[in-house]
Image (cartoon, rainbow, N blue to C red):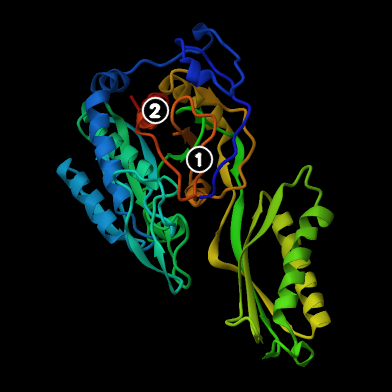
Amino acid sequence: MNKFLLTQFFIIVLSAPSMAQLMSVNENSLNQADIEFTPSELKSALNNEIDGLMTKVVKWRHHFHQYPELGNREFETSKYIAQILRDLGLEVNTGIAYTGLTAYIRGDNPGPLIALRADIDGLPVTEMTNLSYASKVTTQYQGNEVGVMHACGHDAHIAILLGVADFLSRNTDKLHGDILLIFQPAEEGPPEGEEGGAELMLKEGIFDEKPDVVFGLHVTNSYNGAVALKSGPAMASAEAFRINITGTQSHGSTPWASNDPIMAAFDIGTSLQTIISRRIDIRENPAVISVGIVKAGSRNNIIPETAMLEGTIRTFSKDISDLIHREMETIVTNIAEAHNVEAEVNYAVYGSYPVTFNDPELVDRYSKSLIEATNGIFTSDVSASTGAEDFSFFAQEVPGLYFWLGVNAEGVKSAPGNHTPYFVVHDSALDKGVKSFINLVSDYSADNSTN
């Protein structure tokens, strides 16, 4: 997932936060009496166990970080997760959507079925962090030798959810209801021509026993371990597009003998930006078109026969997405004609993600769970992110709540973002992820227990 830009924090003071935690945020103090927290045996037990539990969580994260794998190829990652879950006494379902897996934790007391999700794939990024456990893994991606890195923090997601599984599996006597653990592959997208991710897991039936709710999180590089939550549309829909251009090749010394696909690609790439700047009222309809790949040619003095552009479209509305498609077709067709080349646009070449939608009732009711988990370092005053997440498929099936966890070093105002080779997750922030999941489980099950 692309990096997040979250701003305008408020602090709810339950106990005094450090000065570093107060840096670069707006303080809006509320009295603890303004929020009624729900005590529970689970929360009390976690407070007693958290230090020992986090030792395991950190160890697991370092392992996953050192040995990342790309989407639909997370074979060793999946085996490692499965073994940990089996060691906890859980029955593990493997081979879902190629490399995904699930497991149930059955509570001793009646209550709802709560799904908790973590994504497990890495990215084709060569790590440059100099961590002692930095990835040295390389592999083939789209015909190129690439480094592999957990540059989006999915290693943290796996380790946090394993910590939750470890704790809950030993405290089923305090658990009301059941937990569905989802370890999902290919969140960053499956290889071209393959299905994958949340959509394929659903297609293969992981919600046949339908959960009452699904919770998920994502780490980001700011806010000193704070949690951020956006009600309603929280993240954009996303799809990749590819434009293939075919012209006539010639020697570079005689360009008049060519129909130059590179010049057509230049014009198309520039003109696509006018869709956002001149065709869409972005005051109410945020949207993004970005070209991320341009490929053409093999030698400096040859005008090639073909060129290719590939990019991403991000919107919060299907109507806007449809408008962008129509405008792209018009631009590509007319520019191709002007350059006397042929051009074709293909959409959703790696699949597409819907808008990630946070159920407003869940946000209203369970923000307090996250406030309590983070000792008050929390905000819901954030803008929707133009990043995308296939957690959205789960949240289309059942009510969902998806939150962000800041993992930059304490006192650091800014740090390299997700999807960069310098992205670092600081271990000291991970306990707030574990506590957030446990608080959500405890409070949701208390509200929906059949006792």
Query: Can residue 106 be seen here?
Result: no
Of tags 1 and 2, the one toward the viewer is 2
Quarter of the image with the C terminus is top left
Q: Where's residue 213, x and y in %?
A: 44, 39
Q: Residue at x 46, y 58 (%)?
A: 199
Q: Which mark is residue 432?
A: 2
Dot 1 or dot 2: first in sequence order is: 1
According to the image, label 1 marks what residue?
Answer: 399
In front: 425, or 252? 252
Q: Is residue 303 left or right of residue 208?
A: right
Is the residue under label 2 in contact with that under label 1 (CB below 8 Å)?
no
Q: Residue at x 35, y 63 (%)?
A: 138
The correct choice, above or below, for 171 with respect to 162 in the image is: above
In front: 130, or 138? 130
Q: Is residue 115 left or right of residue 318?
A: left
Q: Where's residue 346, x and y in %?
A: 63, 73
Q: Secondary structure at mark 1?
A: loop
Q: Where's residue 320, x and y in %?
A: 73, 55
Q: Is residue 349 left or right of residue 430?
A: right
The correct choice, above or below, for 357 with respect to 22 in the image is: below
The correct choice, above or below, for 387 with respect to 245 in the image is: above
The correct choice, above or below, for 84 with respect to 202 in the image is: above
Q: Secondary structure at mark 2?
A: helix
Q: Could you tell me how far apart the alpha carbons at marks 1 and 2 are, in whole angstroms?
A: 23 Å
Q: Residue at x 24, y 19 (%)?
A: 48
At label 1, which amino acid type do we have?
Pro
